[in-house]
Amino acid sequence: MKQIVLVLKGMAYGVTHVAPGLGGGIVLLLLGIYEEFVEAMGNLLVQRSRWRQHLAFLIPVGIGAVLGVVLAAVVIDALLEAYPTESMIFFMGLLLGTVPSVLKLHRDMRFSPGRLAALLLGLAFVVGIRAAEPLLVGHGPAYTMTTWPQILYNAVVSFVAGGASVTPGLDGSYILLLGGTYAPVLGAVAALKELVIHWGALLSTGLGAVLGILVFSKLIDLAIKRAPSLAYYAVLGMVLGSVYGLWPDQPARLPAWALALCLLAGGGIALLLGRSPQEPAAAEQNAP
């Protein structure tokens, strides 16, 4: 039963790789497996004595993530196209609903000037990336993933996207948008339903993203273990900054009361998911 639950949680994480604006780190926080995920990914290649434990967690999550990516490429893309503003409002509710969960991730989350600085840095980091979108999106070449330079470029972009997918407040699909590779990658994934395999796009995306997740997970795991409160305040800043990134720029098709329900539904789901007990971080035991 535990493995099935991990597969389902992995599917939710996989969806974030397709839906722009919905960060994988946020979903991992909501599902209560964020710390376990970054610890397992960050130490997979360096803690050989715990390989079995890490793999027992990562394999079902990975299977679910692949399923989530394939399903979301077909379903979520259509939903965002039909109701873009309503979807963004719902995602904003999800983000705001994670705030209580973040504040409970460590025993000592008391406010201080240093933690305020960490929050503001996290906020500025995400807002800066979001603000750069008009300068970057839509102005680069159309990548078809048919030549080696394009495939290598996609692998680099996917590496950054993989790191973003485990950084709360950021999302991998948004990095693909900024890099100009989102459309061909999404097309390659969607083509799988017709048993058409675009090897260059799929392999460069998969390998780059996995390597990015491994590297960034290790860095985040170290930050959480050495300065947990500062790390989580930075996470909180990135979460709040993501609300700015999700602010819709298209008119809504539903009335205001329906938009309010979308916001409340997202927040309510996040609060319910956040009620699940979370394992204390290993660093928390040694924190001053």
Image (spheres, rainbow, N blue to C red):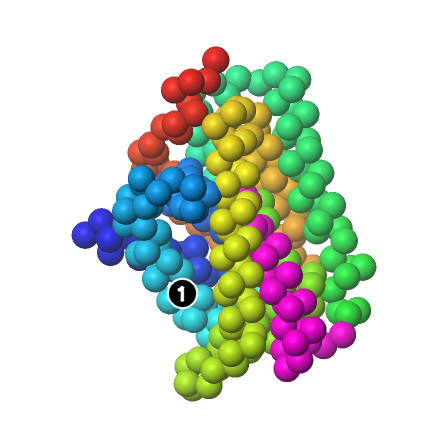
Residue pictured at 72% horizontal, 77% vertical: 142
**Which x, y percent locates residue 203?**
51, 71
Left/right placement of residue 264 relative to residue 3 reads right
Q: Nearer the viewer, residue 220 or 252?
A: 220
Q: Nearer the viewer, residue 7 or 82?
A: 7
User: Few, some or many C-alpha atoms within 10 Å of disc 1 (few <14, some 14-19, many ≥20)?
Assistant: some
Q: Quadrant of residue 4?
A: bottom left
**Overall secondary structure of the magenta section:** helix
The furthest residue to the top: 288
Q: Nearer the viewer, residue 255 or 167?
A: 167
Q: Which residue is mark 1?
A: 66
Residue pictured at 41% horizontal, 81% vertical: 193
Type of the residue with mark 1 = Val
Where 52 falls versus 202 (above or below)?
above
Q: Is residue 125 visible?
A: yes
Residue pictured at 19% horizontal, 52% vertical: 1
Q: Quadrant of residue 30?
A: top left
**Which x, y percent locates residue 97?**
48, 40
First to last magenta residue range: 141-168
Q: Is residue 28 visible?
A: no
Where 203 falls versus 285 (above or below)?
below
Where 175 falls versus 227 (above or below)?
below
Q: Nearer the viewer, residue 76 or 284?
A: 284
Residue pictured at 56% horizontal, 36% vertical: 235
Residue 254 on the magenta segment: no
**Which x, y percent locates residue 232?**
53, 30
Left/right placement of residue 203 relative to residue 128 reads left
**Which x, y percent locates residue 161?**
59, 56
Q: Secondary structure at mark 1?
A: helix
